Amino acid sequence: MRNLFFLSFLLLLVFNGKAQVVATPATDTSGPKTYAIIIGISNYKFIQPLDFADKDAGLFRDFLKSAGGGKLNSEDIFCLLNEEAKAANFWVKGMNWLRSKKLKTGDRLFIYMAGHGDAINQDEYFFLTYDCNPAGDKNNYIITGNIQLYNLKSRIADMVRHGVEVVLVMDACRSNELPGGTEGQQTLNSAISEKNAGEMVMLATGAGQESLEDAAIGTGHGLFTYYLVDGLTGLADSKETPDQKITFKELQTYVSSYVPAIAQEKYKRKQDPYFCCEAFDQKSIAIVDSSFLRKWTAVKTMNNLSGSEMDSIARGFKTRANDNTVADTSFLMTYHLFNKAVQQMKLIGADSSAEFYLSQLTSYDPSNILTREAKATLAAELINYAQTKINLYLQGKDAAAVQQMRSQMDEEENSEEITMTLDRMEKVSKLDFSQTGIMLEKALKLLEIQDSSISKSLAAKVFFFKAHGFFDKGNKTMDYLEALKFAQLANSVDQGAAYTLNTLSSLYIQKHQYDSAVYYASKAIVVAPKWRYPYLNNAYAFYKL
């Protein structure tokens, strides 16, 4: 290691007091406590500023103050933001604060850092503080403002040896414009991960990657930190075995299921958060506080970001180094209303429908990634809606049958997911076949399908719904010959579909052409021998012959 001049002297003074840091007074009989050191820097003095690192730090701090995060008091959190986040403030004031807490076995310490990081080599890698001024040369990190992470790791190792649980969270990826360049970025994350000191590690990215920020997430946050807190609030709790606790593994699974997907799918960037190590998988990181979770969810909604919308947010994304245009507020609000309409199954028609909001998005910016995604979302929902109608038809379930299912479910232990499913089924069951055909036709117009087989299948379903609309209650527009034409078109496009063959049989029964009815019902039975409807048509037509 090189000499660190005056700063090194300060570090030696700090680290020589090991015994004092972990000494536990004999009179202290209290249980384990949680503390946190939090640093967030957006407004650097000498190097390129960031956008939301300080807000990321504030978000994490606020979570720790909640019941789910440990309900930490302000005196249990040492927080440095922007101009206050200087090297001496961390090493002198911060370490003095830490010594005063007299951490003991079983205590937990969160160390959270959001800002720039860089490296010279595997032994000299840094979190860059507000007063960092490398003057264009990475070797100058040695004598300028920084947190030498090798030394911090040594400090962490000492605490771990004395039974303190340390959680190191770092959202510190930066642009290649810093002196270390791409190599420095790769070295930084690999050194942090490889030189584990016994702490739990959560990094925003893997080696050689950049961390994304988004002005549209909340009031502006980093992608990693936002999903980290999102999971910690309770959303990472296993859906299969919820226990109101967030384990290290659950948090890793949750964050890793969102961050890489958004980074890659929406912006063709690679961002794979890093968690270490498996030994901590079952370690509880947070508890689920229902009150805080409700508030968190409400804030997300106010900021136009529901859980499903977070998977799609793209407008305004940027790396923590580049300036991109922030999304227009009215555009994002319309996008939020679009998703709300989808969730409420208000798909087409009225002014408050998803179709209506999609038309507004298109008028704002037809080429925007969110507009294109909304277009695909609506098409998919319309197709799903139509498929549900077909499934209910195949099962012989009308609105009354669905209501009976609901009453039976009420007698058993129910769930929100089952209730939502029944709500959807009941709404679909009440919709006429002809109306469903119109919805599916709209879906086809929205789609840009490359696979002709998919297009043909959907077109056949449109013809089927139009044909079956002949049997809709109160039908006054569809005559027999028109319905028969649509049924024949459906059969010609997608030959051998049992539900189309059975519809032809039903239509021929209406015109007393029982021989044709038997013919198509028999074909439907061959295709779907366990489906009861064709047998009913077949038996009735034979009886009438």
Image (cartoon, rainbow, N blue to C red):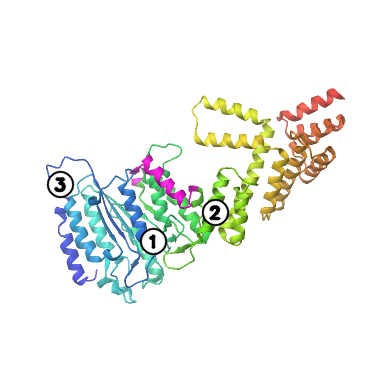
The residue carrying mark 3 is 24
The residue carrying mark 1 is 52
SS for callout 3: loop
Residue at x 36% of width, y 47% of height: 278
Residue sitting nearer the eye, 290 or 120: 290
One can see residue 249 in this view: no
The quadrant of the rendering that contains the N terminus is bottom left
The residue carrying mark 2 is 335
Residue 144's image quarter? bottom left
Q: Of marks 1 and 2, which one's residue comes earlier in the chain?
A: 1
The quadrant of the rendering that contains the C terminus is top right
One can see residue 497 in this view: yes
User: Amino acid type of disc 3?
Assistant: Thr
Residue 544's image quarter? top right
SS for callout 1: loop
Residue farthest along the left direction in this orientation = 26
Residue sitting nearer the eye, 35 or 45: 45
Q: Of marks 1 and 3, which one's residue comes earlier in the chain?
A: 3
Apparent side of residue 161 relative to residue 26 in the rendered image (left or right): right
- Residue 489: percent from the left, percent from the top? 80, 44
Residue at x 19% of width, y 64% of height: 11
Apparent side of residue 54 relative to residue 301 in the rendered image (left or right): left
Is residue 382 positioned above or below 523 on the image?
Answer: below
- Residue 538: percent from the left, percent from the top? 80, 27
Q: Which residues are magenta?
A: 279-307
Q: Disc 1 and disc 3: Cα gap in Å?
A: 38 Å
Q: Residues within 10 Å of mark 2 (few under 14, many from 20)?
A: many
Q: Of marks 2 and 3, which one's residue comes earlier in the chain?
A: 3
